[in-house]
Image (cartoon, rainbow, N blue to C red):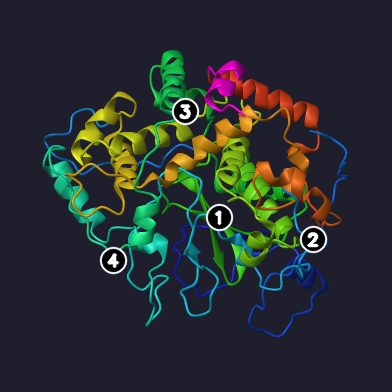
């Protein structure tokens, strides 16, 4: 694990961070290597818990709104393998989220591109030169969907007492294919989303009360480093992931690739004692480990996925990671996934102003509400019209599908086979490369793991009967 301290931005740093691992051994021996460019991710030997093939089985960052007189109380049979992948032949190429079209590891693009994180709304300031080559034919999704005038429109919105519909501008035209793919919101799980939100409010009155009661105290930098270091040791991946601590994020954490290395940025203002490890289970224990395992599989490439006829990794990927975020919590409410689902659904029927006022029943803080609304309305220019960007519905969608089939899913295989849907696990089992597969440490005791999933179902006022009716075979 590599730890970067202090306030960080995602611009080029002049000094290399302290390295635990190889660098530590060099300092102990007193030997120094000649300075040379980093040549990619060097992965230590895999740590493989025994895998039985016979078994069947975030709070948003808050930014205070501008002070105005209006603000009161801001508050079939699978074909044979097509040739195995030489692991890490293209370092970190597997780090992309399954839905992102942003190629974050290409040499002709800027360093440190942030990919879409399964965290609460993250809307950093747009920069026209990020992820944009001089002669690019299509823009990076994450840049294309980020309004370049979001701060200016925010000031207008709050200055108009929430009565102004922002007019967003974008550095490049938003790809029509992307807008078409995510223009329709689903209402399939809206009752479940509202039920989960209401369950939290019934018990705690407000989300802020829930966070204060369950999240624990904010952690210092030293405490965060200690927890992260211990977690990396549990997963056997010390020295593989760069860790940055920052105050610049609006989300709890984001993953990116910098200097050909997977990098995890953690928000200092959102790192709470009881929830930090859940974030690590989400980002490292799910996305990172499944990505490492995927690099060894014959379906690691798009051609391989097509050859094996694989379903998209989502909603399984984000659903599984979201479940792991709340795993082992005393009160594992699925608030974030439910509220994102609800916000997108309502955005498809409302203007920006209408959506902002509608969310007041659930989110008191105007700054946080603004971020949820911008996230749901991204891609639009005139937000006075109904419309949404529906990608954020994937979290609750994946959660409910996994919980519905949790008794029949082989979760260890689901992790070992890489970026695959739970629906493809049984067909892919005989073709998977499992000798070096990593299994998250929290998934090794399957009995306890299943008990936690059952606890999540009960806490969120769900039931197996409801899930079966909602998602019949």
Depth check: give the residue in front, 388 or 232.
388
Q: Which of the two marks, 4 or 3, is nearer to us in this view? A: 4
User: What residue sits right under mark 4 in the picture?
Assistant: 173
Depth check: give the residue in front, 33 or 292.
292
User: What range is drawn magenta here?
Assistant: 461-473
Q: Which of the two marks, 2 or 4, is nearer to us in this view? A: 2
Residue 351, compared with residue 180, is above or below; it is: above
User: What residue sits right under mark 3 in the picture?
Assistant: 211
Q: Position of residue 191 (x, y in %)?
A: 42, 23
Q: Which of the two marks, 1 or 3, is nearer to us in this view? A: 1
Instruction: Tell me which label, 4 or 1, sits earlier in the chain.
Output: 1
- Taking the image as shown, residue 94 lies to the left or right of residue 250, namely right
Secondary element under disc 4, as helix, strand or loop, is loop
User: Could you tell me if the residues under marks 4 and 1 are in contact, i.e. CB atoms within 8 Å?
Assistant: no
User: What residue sits right under mark 2 in the picture?
Assistant: 80
Instruction: Tell me which label, 1 or 3, sits earlier in the chain.
Output: 1
- Disc 3 crowd rating (10 Å Cα; few below 14, some 14-19, many 20+) is some
Number of numbered callouts drawn: 4
Residue that protrudes farthest toward the top in the picture: 202
Q: Which residue occupies 75% across, 47% down? A: 427
In the rendered image, residue 464 lying in the magenta stretch gets the answer: yes
- Taking the image as shown, residue 299 lies to the left or right of residue 135, namely right
- Disc 4 crowd rating (10 Å Cα; few below 14, some 14-19, many 20+) is few
Residue 333, compared with residue 249, is above or below; it is: above
Instruction: Tell me how far mark 4 sits from mark 3, CA to CA.
Output: 38 Å
- Taking the image as shown, residue 330 lies to the left or right of residue 120, namely right
Secondary element under disc 2, as helix, strand or loop, is loop
Q: Position of residue 418 (x, y in %)?
A: 70, 53
User: What residue sits right under mark 1 in the picture?
Assistant: 98
């Amino acid at each position: 694990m590599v730890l970067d301290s202090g306030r960080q931005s995602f611009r080029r740093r002049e000094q290399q961070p302290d390295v635990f691992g190889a660098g530590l051994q060099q300092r102990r021996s007193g030997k120094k290597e000649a300075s040379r460019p980093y040549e990619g991710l060097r992965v230590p030997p895999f740590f493989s818990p025994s895998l039985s093939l016979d078994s069947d089985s975030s709070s948003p960052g808050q930014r205070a709104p501008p002070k105005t007189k209006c603000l009161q109380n801001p508050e079939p049979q699978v074909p044979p393998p097509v040739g195995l992948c030489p692991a890490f032949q293209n370092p970190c190429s597997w780090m992309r989220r399954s839905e992102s079209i942003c190629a974050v590891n290409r040499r002709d693009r800027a360093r440190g591109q942030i990919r879409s994180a399964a965290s609460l709304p993250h809307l950093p300031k747009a920069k026209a030169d990020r992820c944009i080559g001089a002669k690019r034919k299509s823009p990076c999704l994450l840049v294309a969907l980020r309004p370049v005038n979001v701060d200016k429109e925010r000031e207008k919105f709050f200055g108009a007492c929430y009565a102004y519909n922002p007019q967003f501008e974008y550095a490049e035209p938003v790809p029509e294919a992307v807008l078409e793919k995510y223009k329709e919101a689903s209402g399939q799980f809206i009752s479940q989303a509202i039920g989960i939100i209401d369950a939290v409010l019934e018990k705690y009155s407000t989300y802020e009360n829930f966070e204060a009661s369950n999240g624990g105290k904010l952690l210092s930098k030293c405490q965060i480093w200690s927890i992260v270091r211990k977690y990396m040791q549990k997963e056997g991946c010390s020295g593989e992931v760069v860790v940055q601590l920052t105050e610049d994020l609006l989300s709890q954490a984001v993953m990116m690739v910098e200097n050909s290395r997977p990098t995890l940025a953690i928000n200092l203002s959102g790192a709470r004692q009881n929830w930090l490890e859940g974030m690590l289970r989400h980002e490292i224990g799910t996305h990172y480990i499944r990505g490492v395992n995927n690099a060894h599989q014959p379906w690691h490439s798009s051609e391989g996925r097509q050859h094996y006829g694989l379903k998209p990794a989502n909603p399984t990927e984000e659903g599984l990671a979201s479940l792991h975020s709340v795993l082992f919590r005393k009160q594992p409410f699925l608030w974030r996934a439910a509220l994102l689902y609800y916000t997108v659904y309502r955005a498809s029927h409302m203007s920006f102003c209408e959506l902002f006022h509608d969310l007041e029943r659930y989110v008191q803080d105007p700054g946080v509400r603004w971020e949820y609304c911008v996230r749901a309305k991204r891609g639009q220019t005139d937000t006075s019209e109904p419309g949404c960007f529906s990608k954020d519905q994937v979290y609750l969608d994946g959660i409910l599908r996994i919980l519905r089939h949790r008794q029949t899913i082989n979760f260890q295989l689901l992790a070992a086979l890489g970026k695959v849907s739970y629906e493809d696990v049984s067909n892919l089992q005989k073709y998977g490369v499992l000798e070096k597969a990593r299994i998250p440490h929290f998934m090794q005791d399957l009995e306890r793991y299943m008990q936690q999933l059952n606890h999540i179902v009960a806490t969120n006022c769900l039931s197996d009967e409801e899930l079966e009716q909602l998602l019949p075979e």
